[in-house]
Image: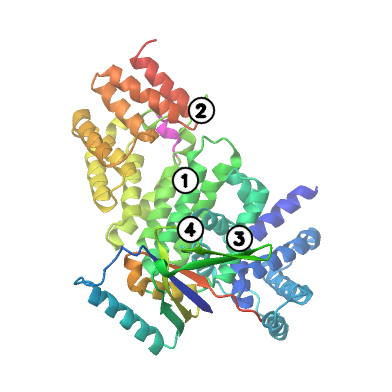
Amino acid sequence: MQYMLLIYNAEDNGPQPGTEEFGPYMQGYVDFTNEVQSAGKMLSGDALQPIATSSTVSVRNGKTEVVDGPFAETKEQLGGFYILDCKDLDEALHYAAKIPDAAYGRVEVRPVMIFD
Amino acid sequence: MQPPVDAHITRVIREDWGRILSALTAHVGNYALAEDSLQDAVVVALDKWQQGLPDHPDAWLLTVARRKAVDRLRRSANASRKEQELALFLEQTRPDPEEVGVIPDHRLELIFACCHPALEEKSRTALTLRAIGGLTTPEIAAAFLDKPDAMAARLTRAKRKIRDAGIPFKLPDASDLPDRVEAVLRVIYLIFNEGFRTNGATLTRADLAEEAIRLGRILSALLPQDAEVKALLALMLLSDSRRHTRMDGAGAYAPLEAQNRARWDKAKIREGTALVKHALTTAPAGPYALQAAISAIHAEATAFADTDWPQIAALYDLLAARRPNPVIAINQAVARSYVEGPEAALSLLEQVATTARLDAYQPFHVCRADLLSRLNRPCEAAENYRAAIALSASTAEKAFLTQRLAAIAPP
């Protein structure tokens, strides 16, 4: 099954650039990505730019409206994601717990809908 | 006389339900399909078995349920290619009619799926009662005082999540096992308390305690090496041995010191005590073993005055160190009050009250009121009794506390 691991955290939470902890924290992502890649689990994954860069679009009555900012103004925002191919939820949960930001924010695990 | 036959058939089906359902789930790889198909088979059985039970009711049900699973897959118009392949596979793997009595037991896998932490806690208890206990949805709804529609919707949601989120039907990895066993034990103990806590308002709820004990027995047989599984079974048996004396003849609530100990269930005490001894000798004492040991010490005392309080207080100290929480701390204070006196207990209680918000917690007020009245401070005690009465859910307990209040503060 394919699972999307969505990484949520407040942008000012967790190790910040320029601090001593930032290096090991980023190395954690490098290691994790290497692990899921060499295990043949990784389908894709990326980090996202901060929410200051975000725009939200909606179309109502044929009219497109664009709003500055993320879909929902919550403290914890989507900061990045992985899509992994796992044999079941337990395996996906195991990998989710290894994502460095699981220790600071939260990781949501969602199965990807497959149309067949 | 139709009803007795039905009752007998229902009992046979319920005994075998969990084992057949788990085997069927392993076979078709889809819990919801397995449950629906077994339910179809039960409907047929309730009709056909009126003329007499087959030689092997479990094998009969499994065979019919397998056929029903194929029917369901064939009938479903929007069956995916995977489902069509499954139907074909199931048809080609007709079980040998000779293989009766060797239905594989996959109940442990089923229990772990039902108690998976990715499911909501209440859904875990409901699913476990359905899948392993064989209770029907209306029975579960009645037990939780829920509407049948709401309970049916809850079960449907949980089953859909098992399927769509890929909750596995397998034994957890060794690294997950302790946590996952603990989750299963918590579900069983929740079911027990759900049935035990009520003032016997309805029979169905008392049955939940019985059902939890039955689940505890099943789990103990499936995980014979696990000391905490045995300890939980012991704890439930020992608590349940006092169920009937928690109300006196007039239906009034009776606390431990006022219970008629001659009416405690000796068989349950014997079994529970033996289990807790076994659990304590085979492994370091876990939280359930400590609680069961405390319950066993109460059971051993022939009168309230004979209770071995120093031993109980020592066990509560161990438990509080392991699992610091207000519920245990309050019991710890009660035990200490009989060893070091109410003064020492009160200072422990005050200490707990500074770290946790206990204003809305009824047992805190009951405990504080009791300690204060033993310390001859009736005005303060009365305040806590009033708070406790306002927070009591059961009328019997309200009446009991009102009586206590009247005894210290005459109107």
Amino acid at pointer 4: Arg
Q: Quadrant of residue B128?
A: bottom right
Number of the front mark, 1 or 3: 3
Magenta-drawn segment: B259-264
Which chain does the residue under circle 1 lie in?
B
B324 vs B6, nearest the viewer: B324
Is residue B97 in the magenta section? no
Q: CA distance from mark 1 to mark 4?
A: 16 Å
- Residue beneath label 2, please? B395
Element type at mark 3: helix
Do residues under tags 3 and 4 come within 8 Å of each other at their CB atoms?
A: no
Query: In the rendered image of this protein, does residue A46 appear above or below residue B231?
Result: below
Q: In this rendering, which labeled residue sits more in front, label 3 or label 2?
A: 3
Which residue type carries mark 3?
Answer: Arg
Count all numbered tags in the image, as a single digit.
4
B127 vs A85: above or below: above
For label 4, the residue is B217
Amino acid identity at mark 2? Thr
Point out which mark residue B193 bears: 1
Amino acid type indicated by mark 1 = Asn
CA–CA distance between discs 1 and 3?
24 Å
SS of the residue under disc 2 = helix
Residue B248 appears in the picture as rendered: no
Q: Are marks 1 and 2 in contact (CB under 8 Å)?
A: no
At x 47%, y 39%, the residue is: B243
